[in-house]
Image (cartoon, coloured by chain):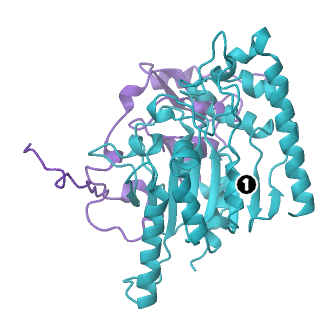
Chain colours: A cyan, B purple
């Protein structure tokens, strides 16, 4: 095992040499690259990366350019996680046979995917990776919509959100199905570590990523990634929206160890009403019409219920 | 391009980020790396910008919030000090200005054509109400 990178404060963190390059084609203010930078800078080890089809993949690997300074592969929509798992299996096999050229180096295997490629299309592949126990980390950049193809709903899209395939209008308030609880599903595989992170809480993020790199076995990370194009807010407000998401408890930050022990890692001092989170985004604009106002209360109740559930689980250690 | 049969389709492309070998990339800063022409580091998205951030080092406290929250790796920070903005890769989103905690802010957005020296000379004064 190589040494863990020592990151006490942001000044120390800022001495990191980035392994992700600018001049990619992600929208201005996209949170994807903020998350990727925080993840890649959390370690000094070599990286073996993959990206499933999605914004991150199409924008960072536009021929003849690549924005990655590490081994990186893209194959299909669904099999980013299995590609990395295959590389990891090969690494293990070569290590066992003593055929590694530099056995002292300990590469980390990370697969990035959007919520479409994880919640829907790549679900079975990820589940397989988690079940087989590869030593990989799967990171979901959860922007709650298929942003790459024009904003179709995914199973991560929350109730009331207006997407191109679930638009709001006279008869509809947008998406009607609740968001899939991917964290619990993944934790139910009994994996050593699953965590929900947000780019605005960089310290919490780095701590979780480093813990994920340190444990043996598959790790699942769900990162909220505010999307300026599909969530419809100004590019400069990305971090503000992420702050609202974590402080209104719509995206509670917690971790599940060995599929059982749940720890809440961030408790906001002042909990913001969910209404503020909804009001800041264009995709929820119609909820503030008189006929749909009842949905805001339902949102708040749902978030409160989930928060109470997490706290009960944390206390009961199950 | 010659017509291809069903079993002869193109295999993928492989791009090399660097010319030559880099041994310890995690300890090599961008200016010391030999980027190949396939790295997007050598490209520019400066024409995406309508407004640009201007950095005034007089007020900067080197908190590095802008460095961590920059989506485009455009805030250059070396030895725990903020050096400046990489104008080839900045898309002008304005996140750095939003997260800047100083008063007055040490990064502000100006129109692309603004003259850097004159805007720094006319930098806004401390805003008492906001403090």
Q: Left or right? Give the position of B60 relative to B127.
A: left
When asked about the image quadrant of residue A218, the answer is bottom right
- Please say whether residue A15 is visible from this viewpoint: no
Measured as percent of width and height from the top left, residue B36 is found at 27, 54
Measured as percent of width and height from the top left, residue A296 is found at 80, 23
Above or below residue A44? Residue B88 is above
Residue at 44% over, 77% down: A91
Residue at 50% over, 66% down: A109
Q: Where does label 1 land, which residue?
A: A184
Q: Chain of mark 1?
A: A
Q: Residues within 10 Å of mark 1 (few under 14, many from 20)?
A: few
Query: Residue pushed farthest left?
Result: B2
Pick whichever, A295 or B107, lies toward us. Answer: A295
Above or below residue A308? Residue A264 is below
Above or below residue A308? Residue A205 is below
Residue at 57% over, 54% down: A139
Q: Quadrant of the N terminus of chain B?
A: top left
């Amino acid at each position: 095992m190589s040494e863990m990178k020592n990151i006490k404060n942001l000044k120390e963190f800022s001495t990191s040499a980035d392994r992700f390059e600018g001049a990619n084609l992600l929208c201005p203010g996209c949170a994807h690259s903020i998350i990727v930078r925080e993840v890649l800078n959390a370690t000094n080890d070599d990286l073996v990366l993959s990206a499933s089809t999605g914004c991150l993949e199409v924008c960072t690997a536009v021929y003849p350019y690549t924005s990655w300074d590490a081994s990186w592969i893209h194959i299909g929509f669904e099999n980013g996680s299995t590609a990395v798992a295959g590389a990891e299996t090969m690494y293990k096999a070569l290590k066992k046979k003593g055929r590694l050229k530099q056995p002292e180096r300990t590469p980390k295997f990370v697969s990035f995917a959007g919520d479409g490629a994880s919640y829907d299309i790549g679900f079975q592949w990820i589940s397989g990776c988690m079940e087989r126990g590869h030593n990989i980390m799967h990171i979901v950049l959860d922007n709650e919509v298929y942003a790459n193809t024009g904003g179709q709903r995914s199973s991560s899209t929350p109730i009331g959100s207006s997407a191109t395939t679930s638009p709001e209008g006279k008869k509809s308030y947008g998406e009607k199905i609740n968001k899939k609880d991917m964290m619990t599903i993944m934790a139910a595989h009994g994996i050593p570590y699953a965590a929900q992170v947000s780019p605005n809480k960089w310290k919490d993020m780095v701590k979780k990523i480093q813990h994920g790199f340190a444990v043996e076995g598959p790790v699942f990370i769900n990162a909220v990634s505010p999307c300026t194009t599909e969530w419809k807010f100004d590019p400069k407000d990305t971090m503000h929206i992420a702050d609202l998401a974590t402080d209104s408890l719509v995206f509670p930050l917690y971790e599940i160890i060995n599929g059982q022990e749940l720890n809440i890692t961030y408790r906001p001092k002042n909990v913001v009403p969910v209404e503020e989170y909804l009001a800041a985004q264009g995709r929820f604009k119609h909820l503030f019409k008189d006929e749909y106002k009842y949905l805001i209360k339902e949102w708040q109740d749902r978030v409160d219920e989930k928060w109470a559930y997490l706290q009960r689980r944390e206390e009961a250690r199950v | 391009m010659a017509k291809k049969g069903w079993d002869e389709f193109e295999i993928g492309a492989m791009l090399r980020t660097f010319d030559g070998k880099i041994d310890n990339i995690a300890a090599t800063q961008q200016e010391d790396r030999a980027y190949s022409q396939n790295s997007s580091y050598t490209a520019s998205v400066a024409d995406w910008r309508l407004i640009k951030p201007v950095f005034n080092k007089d007020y900067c406290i080197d908190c590095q919030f802008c460095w961590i929250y920059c989506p485009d790796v455009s805030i250059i920070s070396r030895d725990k000090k903020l050096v400046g903005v990489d104008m080839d890769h900045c898309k002008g989103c304005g996140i750095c200005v939003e997260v800047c905690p100083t008063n007055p802010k040490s990064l502000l957005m100006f129109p692309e054509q603004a003259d850097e020296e004159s805007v720094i000379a006319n930098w806004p004064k401390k805003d008492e109400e906001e403090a």
